[in-house]
Image (tube, rainbow, N blue to C red):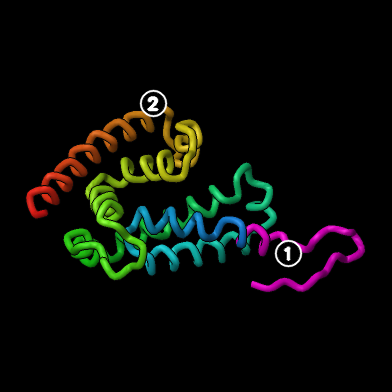
Amino acid sequence: MTAERSFGGTGRPSDAEDFDAFYAACAGRVVGHVYTLTGNRTEAEDAVAEAFTRAWQHWPEVRDADSPEAWVRRVATRIAVSSWRKAFNRVRAHRRAAVDHSVPGLTEDHVALLQALQRLGVNERRAVVLHHLNDLSVADVAAEMGKPVGTIKTYLARGRRAMAGLLDEAHQEEASHG
């Protein structure tokens, strides 16, 4: 997005300039977050684009939120989940399919991590991604997910336990083939 400079004599940047700066600062992180949740970069980019469109439509409220980035991340996550529900059969087939190995920069460890994340429940996966990959505190994860801190701790414990088992299986399979 490009913004015209319209200070209107106030000396303040316009809403468009504020929004453009916000978008530039966090769009990549939000796409990375949703991609990690969905395992599909195109779906992630579509959900994030829609979330930023909604953020622009509600910019005065979003700008004044405690964390505008969390607002966009939450909306993008909801859009992605809605997409999952609308296309359940496609997502189910995707989960069974191997991760696209043509994406540059993916190592076997990255592929194993993404495949393991896809096998977690939605709440556990979201909590693990927010806490361990986005470096949010447990309290921040609880606020973003709208759940009590104790529930988030349970999601994290279950998610880590499941991930450990899944990654250990992947490592054993790799060792037996290699």
**Tag 1 secondary structure:** helix
The structure residue drawn at horizontal position 27% and vertical position 51%, both measured from the top left corner, is 109
The mark lying in front, picked from 2 and 1, is: 1
Q: Nearer the viewer, residue 25 or 53?
A: 25
Q: Nearer the viewer, residue 132 or 19?
A: 132
Whole-Å distance between the Cαs marked 2 and 1? 40 Å
Magenta stretch, main secondary structure, is: loop
What residue is disc 1 on?
17
Left or right, 160 with reference to 171: right
Picture quarter with the C terminus: bottom left
Q: Amino acid at mark 2?
A: Gly
The structure residue drawn at horizontal position 24% and vertical position 52%, both measured from the top left corner, is 112
Q: Residue furthest top?
A: 150
**Could you say where residue 50 lies in the image, as x and y percent from the top left?**
50, 66
Q: Nearer the viewer, residue 8 or 85?
A: 8
**Tag 2 secondary structure:** helix
- Residue 115 can be seen in this image: yes
Which of the labelled discs sits on residue 150, or is there none?
A: 2
Asked if the residue under mark 1 is in contact with the one under mark 2, i.e. CB atoms within 8 Å, the reply is: no
Q: Is residue 80 above or below residue 128?
A: below
- Residue 118 can be seen in this image: no
Left or right, 4 with reference to 43: right
Left or right, 3 with reference to 145: right
Picture quadrant of residue 160: top left
**Could you say where residue 137 lies in the image, as x and y percent from the top left?**
48, 34
Residue stretch in magenta? 1-23
